Image (cartoon, grey):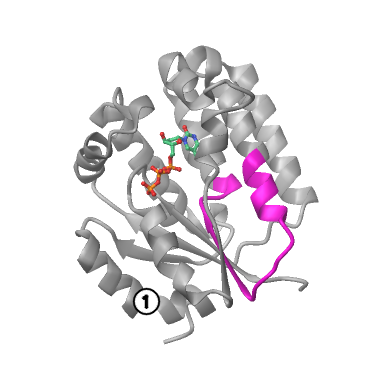
């Protein structure tokens, strides 16, 4: 299969991306769902890169983002097996949200930033990283902070509201304010502040657009 319709699900930490992916698994074999490899990030030959990044982002932020870029490229370039491929995140959110945030907040040195962004530019130009639709799960930072606290992922318990506000603002810059320049695809924005049963209703109502593009109804 040459090219699937590729959907990337984006949104702040704990915005509900995995829930959307879980929901769309029922459309197999039309849909292939590719989850984010967070387990790989937590165990690189015995090293927990996610934990190290939160403990000392100045020392480990670039290493973590470099590994995340590698695993995300592997997902983007994985041969297609179904007409629709739904991925959690993309190379682009790594670049425009997380790398940008580390650098903007002066945690990441200029050199680390330049090297990572040059890698991003080269990867996105030289590989088949086509994205057809972005689903943006838009949330308020206060809402995702509560979810981060209640899901008890140990590495994330140190996350303050300010970090989620900064990431929220960068998602907004990327997918709302500068979408025509920076987004690799049209953006479907969903209000993801709601509880899970309400979100399942939204996914059901929006499923044609998510599977076949914004023109579908
Ligand atoms: P997310 O990619 O936001 O995944 P999530 O598990 O929060 O998604 P959801 O609850 O919406 O299903 O982040 C996973 C962790 O990895 C989080 O602690 C943030 C971190 N991360 C980075 O630090 N840099 C990155 O480039 C990415 C993609 C994630």
- The answer to whether residue 67 is above or below residue 146 is above
Q: Nearer the viewer, residue 158 or 99?
A: 158
Which residue is pictured at 51% across the width and 29% down the height? 42
Question: Which range of residues does the magenta coloring cover?
Answer: 71-92
Residue 10's spot in the image, x, y percent?
Answer: 44, 53
Q: Nearer the viewer, residue 8 or 181?
A: 8
The image quadrant where one finds ligand 1 is top left
Q: Mark 1 — residue? A: 206
Residue extending furthest toward the bottom:
217
- The answer to whether residue 183 is above or below residue 93 is below
Residue 136 lies in magenta, yes or no?
Answer: no
Residue 51's spot in the image, x, y percent?
Answer: 45, 22
Instruction: Say if residue 198 shows up in the picture.
Output: yes
Residue 6's spot in the image, x, y percent?
Answer: 60, 66
Q: Nearer the viewer, residue 18 or 193?
A: 18
Instruction: Say if residue 213 shows up in the picture.
Output: no
Which residue is pictured at 32% across the width and 55% down the height? 138
Q: Nearer the viewer, residue 175 or 80?
A: 80
Residue 163's spot in the image, x, y percent?
Answer: 32, 30
Residue extending furthest toward the front:
46
Which residue is pictured at 37% across the width and 64% down the height? 189
117 relative to 86 in the view: left or right: right
- The answer to whether residue 131 is above or below residue 37 is below
Which residue is pictured at 74% across the width and 61% down the height? 79
**Which of the 4 image quadrants contains residue 203?**
bottom left
Residue 90 lies in magenta, yes or no?
Answer: yes
Quarter holding the C terminus?
bottom left
Quarter holding the N terminus?
bottom right
């Amino acid at each position: 299969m040459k090219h699937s319709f590729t959907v990337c699900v984006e949104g702040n930490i704990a915005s509900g991306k995995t829930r959307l992916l879980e929901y769309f698994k029922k459309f197999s074999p039309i849909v292939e769902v590719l989850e984010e490899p967070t387990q790989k990030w937590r165990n690189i030959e015995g090293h927990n890169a996610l934990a190290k990044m939160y403990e000392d982002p100045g020392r480990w932020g670039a290493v973590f983002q470099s590994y995340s870029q590698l695993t995300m490229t592997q997902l983007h370039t994985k041969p297609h097996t179904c007409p629709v491929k739904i991925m959690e995140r993309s190379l682009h959110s790594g670049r425009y949200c997380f790398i940008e945030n580390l650098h903007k907040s002066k945690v990441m040195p200029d050199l680390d930033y330049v090297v990572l962004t040059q890698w991003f530019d080269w990867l996105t130009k030289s590989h088949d990283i086509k994205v057809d639709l972005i689903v943006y799960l838009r949330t308020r930072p206060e809402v995702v902070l509560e979810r981060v606290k209640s899901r008890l992922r140990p590495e994330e318990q140190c996350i303050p509201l300010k970090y989620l506000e900064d990431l929220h603002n960068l998602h907004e810059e990327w997918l709302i304010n500068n979408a025509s320049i920076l987004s690799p695809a049209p953006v479907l924005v969903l209000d993801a502040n709601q509880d899970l049963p309400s979100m399942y209703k939204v996914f059901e109502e929006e499923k044609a657009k998510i599977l076949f593009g914004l023109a579908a109804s």
